[in-house]
Image (cartoon, rainbow, N blue to C red):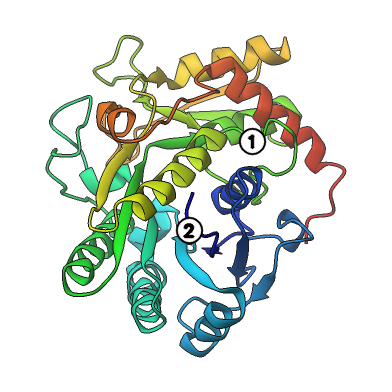
Amino acid sequence: MPDRFTILVTGGAGYIGSHAVWALKDTGWPVAVIDNLTTGFRWAVPDDVPFYKGNVEDSTLIAKIAKKQNIGAIMHFAGSVVVPESVENPLKYYDNNTAKSRSLIESAVANGIKHFIFSSTAATYGIPEESPVTEDTAQVPINPYGMSKLMTEYMLRDVSAAHDLNFCALRYFNVAGADPGGRTGQSTAGATHLIKVAVEAALGKRDSVAIFGTDYDTPDGTGVRDYIHVSDLAAAHVHALEALVAEPERNHLLNCGYGRGFSVLEVLDAVDRVTNQKISRKLEGRRAGDPDSLISDNRAIMKRFPWQPQNADLDKIVAHALAWERKLGDIRIE
């Protein structure tokens, strides 16, 4: 095992970032967090983890953290993630997701931080002509969110070729669920993730769940997606870190999903099963840019890392999301 330098987690007070913080702690890695708390929550970061409220483009602050905490790697989750908003406000996304990532990468190089794990997305593939999607599928984003992430992948590739920095970009499919131990979960108000919306409806926080399109080329006519439990995703980041440390000359660009899909109706049926009640469903028209099916080919990550998903069960994902949603009622969101 390498010397245990500290991992700086950007956006570590947010949904996926906070799960990564716990995954690092659980495996013995020292960790520090930077988050501007725009969408994250201070209480989501464990009390014994050094926390810095600030922005990733603040090179002076990053340099201070790097020196004080002995930072050897960055896990970069900070950014904006709402696809429709990216269409309405592309400059926000090219600022938050691309320009600020560029500054952070520059800080990594300047401070001798040699490993970089990047939170990328299946949105870089746009509407793929094939499913399942492999890492070699053409990346043709159809919205600024996907493009902003792809541009950061390109920057990491080019910087890695020029400097002593290796990286892993994990292209997430549909992230869902919550920490099985109830330590953190999806807490953002107005979230658009289907399972989050559905469990809110099951608990009476929403009147109904909208189904956008019932005429897709899928078995039941609704869109099919590859849902991955957030804790399994967080574990994949730890494996990515350890792979980067073990092979400093190697980079990784990998899909992160389970390699199977569920339709919108199948997800809602799972919520009904887990809650033993029927949530109200509201049929709406298609949303622009939604592919019929988006499923990962995950053979590369399974071969590359010793990653063994522990929560690849739709009912389990729903149950953990539901338990967290109930717990949120006891947490003061601020």
The dot on residue 251 is: none
Rounded to the nearest angstrom, the CA distance separating label 1 from label 2 is 17 Å
Q: Is residue 88 visible?
A: yes
Return the residue found at the far bottom.
60
Residue 329's x, y, as percent? 83, 41
Residue 63's x, y, as percent? 50, 85
**Amino acid carrying mark 1 in the image:** Ala
The residue to which callout 2 is attached is 77
Relative to 251, does residue 202 appear above or below in the rendering? above
Side (left or right) of 131 relative to 203: left
Q: Residue at x 20, y 25 (%)?
A: 131
* Earlier-in-chain disc, 1 versus 2: 2
Side (left or right) of 135 relative to 36: left
**Amino acid carrying mark 2 in the image:** Phe
The dot on residue 178 is: 1
Q: Residue at x 79, y 42 (%)?
A: 328
Say which of 178 and 19 sits in front.
Answer: 19
Q: Secondary structure at mark 2?
A: loop
Residue 96's x, y, as percent? 42, 71
Q: Residue at x 41, y 18 (%)?
A: 262
Residue 147's x, y, as percent? 25, 59
Q: Secondary structure at mark 1?
A: loop
Relative to 204, does residue 25 appear above or below in the rendering? below
Rendered image quadrant of residue 201: top right
Q: Residue at x 35, y 39 (%)?
A: 287
Q: Give the crowd class for mark 1: few <14, some 14-19, many >=20 residues within 10 Å.
A: many
Side (left or right) of 52 relative to 249: right
